[in-house]
Image: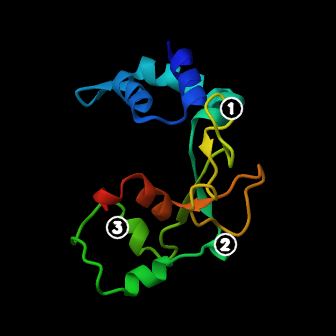
Amino acid sequence: LLNVFAQMIHDHGPQPRLLRFFKNITSVNGKSIPANQEALLRVLWADERVHQQSLIDIVQIPERLSPHITTKDLKSNTSIKHPNDYLGKKVFTSSAGLPHLGVKWFGKSDWVEYCDALFFDAESLGLETCEEKTSDGDMIVPIEDFCWVLEPERL
């Protein structure tokens, strides 16, 4: 069944209804189902071809390629309000700061259903990318730009 849904993501792109299926089989009422999580990992992650056609990867963007605001800029920006204690505070306030994250996926400018790519590439979606591509030739999109496109109403 997992293989069928992985194939449907490959064939039709990352549709919310397909992704909700994976979410719903890996936990119920906030309680994880380890056997299903492990099976999903084997189906989507272990096979490099399936991984490339089904998943979006989060990668760290090297500082030299980072086109956006730095952690130092965030710390000095007085318009940003946050509680006294929050998840990730130790990392954010450390001297190293937060890594700048991006997302990458295997996309094509001429994506259509049933092709061997997850979806359109970043350029075709009008997303800003880093100057250099990954060693695989994939474009890296700063995560804040990618999330904006997914659900701007939640920002």
Q: Identity of the amino acid at label 1? A: Cys
Residue 5, given in percent of the width and then of the height, sits at 51, 20
Q: Looking at the image, is mark 1 or mark 2 earlier in the sequence?
A: 2
| Dot 1: element | loop
Which label sits on residue 13? none
Instruction: Please tell me which residue is depicted at 49% across the width and 78% down the height of the picture.
Output: 69
- Nearest the viewer among 28 and 96 is 28
Provide the residue designation for mark 2: 65
- Nearest the viewer among 99 and 149 is 149
- Nearest the viewer among 61 and 91 is 61
Q: Mark 1–mark 3 contact, CB under 8 Å?
A: no
Provide the residue designation for mark 3: 89
- Nearest the viewer among 15 and 83 is 15
* Residue 105 against residue 61 in the figure, above or below: above
Residue 57, given in percent of the width and then of the height, sits at 58, 46
Provide the residue designation for mark 1: 115
